[in-house]
Amino acid sequence: MLTGLSLLFVGAVLFINGLWMLGRIADREIIFINLFAGIVTGAVAFKTAFGLGASLVEVRMGALTLMFTATYMWVAVNRILELDGRGLGWFSLLVAMTVAPVMVQEWSAASSVLGAWLAISWGIWTVLWAMNFAHLTLGWRIERATGRVTLLSGIFTGWGPAMLLLNGG
């Protein structure tokens, strides 16, 4: 059930951040959802990774979830302090390099629709973090494309699956 909880807020923050990148929401309006999603995913990650007797799989999932948490918190801090995002861009490159092998591992282990969805989601998230690196650090003018990918990934890798999980699907 914690996966559904996390994914619900991953979906919400990606959707809202996508709208922001597309110019539909002002900079300061995304601060709250990024902080809130960071707190929710952080709490889930800490419970998962640092619970008494946590297995290697639980620590791994907690660590990977904290990559999302750090990203959302960093976006919020960038908006609060009006920073240019280059540091977040470099972090995004590190995260993309970290999660790309996760996509490959999940794909090779996928034995169900859920497993395939998870592998595809890791692939989409890898691309999304790489796009943020290219935009924020390298200065590529792909903000609109990144905004569209962010918005759609919020729906298809976060919110939609969360709704299924939270409703017993």
Image (cartoon, rainbow, N blue to C red):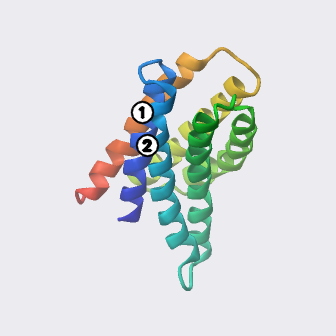
Could you tell me which residue is drawn at 36 percent across and 57 percent down?
4
The dot on residue 158 is none
Q: Locate residue 81 relative to residue 23 in the image: left or right.
A: right
Residue 126's image quarter?
A: top right
Which residue corresponds to the image point at 56% horizontal and 41% vertical from the top-left? 76
Relative to residue 43, is residue 96 drawn left or right?
right
Quadrant in which residue 137 is drawn: top right
Earlier residue among tags 2 and 1: 1
Which residue is nearer to you in this view: 61 or 31?
Answer: 31
Badge 2 local density, few (<14 within 10 Å), some, or many (20+)? many
Residue found at the far front of this picture: 81
Please determine whether, in this image, residue 34 is positioned above or below residue 3.
Answer: above
Q: Is residue 19 left or right of residue 103?
A: left
Amino acid type shown at disc 2: Ile
For disc 2, the marked residue is: 33
Image quarter where the N terminus lies is bottom left
Question: CB atoms at circles 2 and 1 under 8 Å apart?
Answer: yes
Secondary structure, mark 1, is: helix
Residue 10 is situated, as x and y percent measured from the top left of the image, at 45, 46
Residue type (three-letter) at the residue carrying disc 1: Ile
Number of marks drawn: 2
Q: Position of residue 72 (x, y in %)?
A: 55, 45
Q: Which residue is located at x 53 percent, y 64 percent?
A: 45
Label 1 belongs to which residue? Answer: 16
User: In terms of secondary structure, where does tag 2 sit?
Assistant: helix
Who's the residue at 58% across and 19% down the image?
143
| Alpha carbons under labels 2 and 1: distance apart | 8 Å
Residue 15 appears at what percent x and percent y?
Answer: 41, 34
Relative vertical location of residue 166 with respect to residue 134 in this rendering, above or below: below
